[in-house]
Amino acid sequence: MNLRALITDAGQLGWGLVLHARAAARLERLLGLWIFRVNVRSLANLPHDPLPRGVTVRLLNETQLIHHARDPRYCLASRFIRRAMSRGDQAYGAFEEGKLVGYTWRSASTAPFFNGLWLKVPTPFIYAYKSYTLPSHRGRGMYGALTSFTDRQSRAIGHPMVLTLIDIANIPSLRASAHVGSRKAGYAGYLKLFGTCFTFRTPAVRAMGVELYAPAREVRSTKGRSAGVTPDPVVASRQALGIAAVLIERFSVHCRILAASICVALRRHYSNVSP
Ligand SMILES: CC(C)(COP(=O)(O)OP(=O)(O)OC[C@H]1O[C@@H](n2cnc3c(N)ncnc32)[C@H](O)[C@@H]1OP(=O)(O)O)[C@@H](O)C(=O)NCCC(=O)NCCS
């Protein structure tokens, strides 16, 4: 564990939130299970939030994005930009003193998710994804400024609702989303086992039509239907047993590591205190 990063994060977010985020991230990695909170926001009554002083927001074109992608601080890849633009996605940037300090993407069709999975955006939603604020500008409401501007643009082109999926370990993003008035619709995510992703979503998210899928190879959905596969009950129960066995195995490995670390710590402690 990087103690310095932990202390820095605790200074910004508070110990409670930081420990919660670290525990959630660790559990996700340990179990191979990634859970995302599905947030929705109505664009019917948008508050008129003024932009922070000296900040402007505008739509970015491909040339501008490719230019910024040369700077690794922006975590943007040219290939990602070209593909997103060819699908019709839009990117908006927040500028301070002429410098790009944050951006966000919007898609009304499909968008890359994580681990090779994609997200199908249901009508009439627009999907807000890949939001980013430069570390030097975080915690200053840039996300809210971008969102306020972008929401108006999305509403103007006919979308009444915004959709976001946020990793439950990503506390800054969950808080930023809460600040702009998003509410929880449910959860979705995936379990990665032996290189295969098994997707899941809660009933409300399913009813909305939100779907995670792998475009190139088949994703086995835990419900079978979203991938267009008719589930065979015998195969499904074998899969469920297999998943349970792997989860138990991963959990027991973690417990053994924890127990071993405690033993080592206790041994060191008692060897130090004994004469
Ligand atoms: C998520 C993200 C876009 C939020 O942007 P932002 O402009 O900092 O948003 P806000 O100013 O509204 O701050 C949101 C939360 O960030 C946290 N925060 C505050 N200062 C921070 C800092 N210096 N560094 C990191 N996070 C900070 C706080 O929890 C804050 O909520 P609070 O004001 O209720 O305490 C930004 O943290 C980011 O780029 N993260 C990395 C990329 C990412 O995770 N994107 C989201 C993918 S869904």
Image: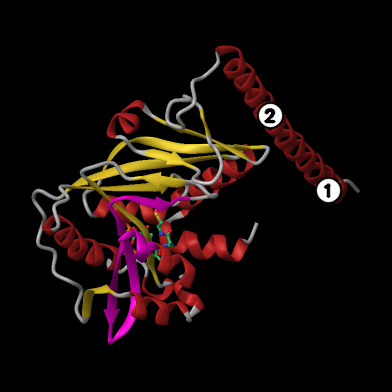
The x, y position of residue 3, in whole percent, is 62, 61
The x, y position of residue 52, in whole percent, is 20, 73
Residue pictured at 54% horizontal, 37% vertical: 218
Q: What is the span of residues highlighted in magenta in the rendered image?
A: 84-113
View quadrant of ligand 1: bottom left
Residue type for callout 2? Val
Residue that lies at the very extreme toward the right in this rendered image = 275
**SS for dot 1:** helix
Residue 174 in the image: above or below residue 192? below
Does the image show residue 185? yes
141 vs 63, left or right, is left
Query: How far separated are the C-alphas under marks 1 and 2?
Result: 33 Å
Q: How is the image coloured?
A: secondary structure
Circle 1 or circle 2, nearest the eye: 2
Does the image show residue 75? no
User: What secondary structure do most residues of the magenta stretch adopt?
Assistant: strand
How many other residues sit within 10 Å of disc 2, few (<14), some (14-19) or many (≥20)? some
**Which one is nearer the viewer's eye here, 119 or 145?**
119
96 vs 65, left or right, is left
Residue type for callout 1? Arg
Q: Which mark is residue 246?
A: 2
The x, y position of residue 55, in whole percent, is 23, 78
The x, y position of residue 121, in whole percent, is 32, 45
Residue 63 in the image: above or below residue 275? below
245 vs 268, left or right, is left
Residue carrying label 1? 268
**Mark 2 C-beta to ligand 1 under 8 Å:** no
The answer to whether residue 106 is magenta is yes
Residue pictured at 56% horizontal, 64% vertical: 5
Residue 65 in the image: above or below residue 152? below
**Disc 1 and disc 2 in contact, CB within 8 angstroms:** no
148 vs 219, left or right, is left
